[in-house]
Amino acid sequence: MIVCGIFAALFAADPPPARKPAVKKPVVKKAASPKTATKTATTKKKGKAPARPVASNSWRPRQLSPTPDRYKEIQQALASKGYLKSEPSGVWDADSTEAMKQFQTDRNLTPTGKITAPALIGLGLGPKPEGSETPVAAPPQ
């Protein structure tokens, strides 16, 4: 009976005071600056990292347009091989493009008319292959 007395005492006691519900504080959002507003709007994609803008000074080297002197040098090489009929002017015009296309066709290159590395090598204006260096004469004694 002692056991029954303990249970009776437990149930007869006043119930514990009820817990008060937690009070949620209102969340106050700060106004976003224009920079933050655009960043958050563009980076809210699920599962993917945000795209980075391409910088104008990226690490990749960019090919520059040849100078008029370089155009003239290429035109002279085309003229000396009989492809360019006009006088080398330093301006890459329609005659230069047609001459380059004909040269590329004769060399089994893709005839684009554009100045390419294989075309320059064929004209003798590109880098020399290894082992074909011209020996330098010994200085006079």
Image (tube, rainbow, N blue to C red):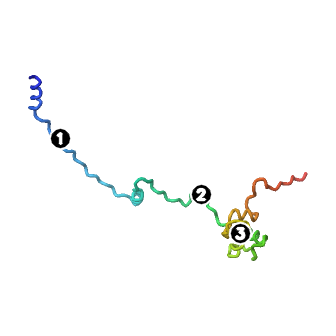
Q: Residues within 10 Å of mark 2 (few under 14, many from 20)?
A: few
Labels 2 and 3 touching (C-beta < 8 A)? no
What kind of residue is marked 3? Thr
Q: Nearer the viewer, mark 2 or mark 3?
A: 3
Of the image marks 3 and 1, the number of the one nearer the N terminus? 1
Q: Secondary structure at mark 2?
A: loop
Of the image marks 2 and 1, the number of the one nearer the N terminus? 1
Q: Residue at x 73, y 66 (%)?
A: 107
Q: Quadrant of the N terminus?
A: top left
Place residue 100 in its image quadrant: bottom right
Q: How many marks?
A: 3
Q: Residue at x 61, y 58 (%)?
A: 61
Find disc 3 in the rendering and name its residue: 105
Q: Position of residue 5 (x, y in %)?
A: 9, 25
Find disc 1 in the rendering and name its residue: 19
Of the image marks 2 and 3, the number of the one nearer the N terminus? 2
Q: Residue at x 78, y 53 (%)?
A: 131
Mark 3–mark 1 Cα distance, whole angstroms, equals: 91 Å
Q: Secondary structure at mark 3?
A: helix
Q: Secondary structure at mark 1?
A: loop
Outermost residue on the bottom side: it is 86
Judge left or right: residue 132 versus residue 20: right
Place residue 32 in its image quadrant: bottom left
Q: Nearer the viewer, mark 3 or mark 1?
A: 3
Q: Position of residue 72 (x, y in %)?
A: 73, 70
Of residues 2 and 12, which is closer to you in this image? 2
What kind of residue is marked 2? Arg
What kind of residue is marked 1? Arg
Mark 2–mark 3 Cα distance, whole angstroms, equals: 31 Å
Mark on residue 60?
A: 2
Labels 3 and 1 touching (C-beta < 8 A)? no
